[in-house]
Image (spheres, rainbow, N blue to C red):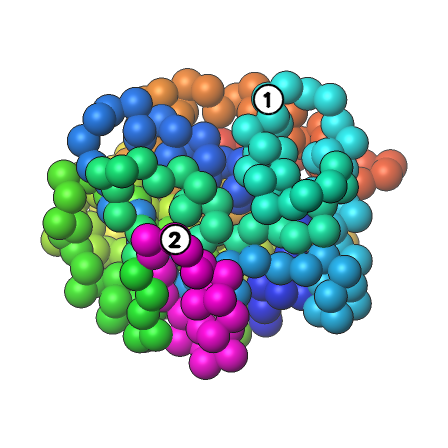
Amino acid sequence: MNYRHAFHAGNSADVVKHALLIALVQALQLKPSALTLIDTHAACGLYDLQGDEAGRTGEAAGGVLRAFADANPLLDDYRAAVRAENDGPEPRLYPGSPRILAQALREQDALILNEKHPEDARSLREAMRGTPAAIHTRDAYELWLALLPTRTPRGLVVVDPPYEETDERARITATLAAAHRKWAHGVTVIWYPLKERPTHALWKDKLRKTGIPKFLNVEHWLYDADQPGIYNGAGLFIVNPPYAFTQSLPPLLEALCTALAPEGHRGTLKAEWLVK
């Protein structure tokens, strides 16, 4: 499944991913010690919702625009992060994870971004101008392992590939297992699109077999019944989520599910431990 970020900017998957990423960083920053934030597949960093790619799909209408139309205060932090990139009341520019993470940086924190695609890397450098982000253009999985353990006491790795390669899930599984051996206490977030349940169930079984404890799975199925052959939602695997994050998660997921439900559907958005 090819999932180039620019075509899907601001869709329902972005809203869930970025709302949870903000909540996760906030929970980690309850402690004063420094954090290293690493984004292995940073893409362009900032997107024009009226540009060619995002405009072609129009997926922001079912994502960020729904979140802005909703009044639930639990989505205020997410909306504030999007508003920070815009001058007017309606979002024209949409921040990817690099800009979201840059907004959250404290003086003691570090941000490392990686994007191998040459065109996207150029856009990323432009989007991150004026921020303290270090930008690399390496193989994402090689960089992931090379930067562990982080130089700071704590860290967060965000893995958000476009799933263009047939072995993407296998590389994630192998690299995650190796990363955990080097950095057992580190926090890792892995984003993925949902299309077919059987294929996804097989991947979850392989991830369970890595033996990694404290492995949370958040899944958002948009429709009450799967729509064959199309994008049905997205999810996150989160290794070592902090306690403050897991405690605040249920009401946030409920708010997101309600705000993003397509017309005529309720869908599901829930979290469960992958390894019980």
Q: Is residue 2 visible?
A: yes
Q: Nearer the viewer, mark 1 or mark 2?
A: 2
Circle 1 crowding by C-alpha within 10 Å: few under 14, some 14–19, many from 20: some
Circle 2 crowding by C-alpha within 10 Å: few under 14, some 14–19, many from 20: few
- Across and down, in percent, residue 78 comes to 57, 34
Quarter holding the N terminus is bottom right
The disc at residue 74 is 1
Q: Residue at x 41, y 55 (%)?
A: 130
Alpha carbon distance from label 1 to label 2: 27 Å
Where 271 sits versus 183, above or below? above
Where 200 sits versus 184, above or below? below
The disc at residue 131 is 2
Q: Please, what secondary structure does the residue beneath circle 1 have?
A: helix
The disc at residue 152 is none
Magenta segment: 113-133
Q: Is residue 15 visible?
A: no
Q: Residue at x 65, y 45 (%)?
A: 86
Q: Nearer the viewer, residue 217 or 262?
A: 262
- Across and down, in percent, residue 267 comes to 71, 36
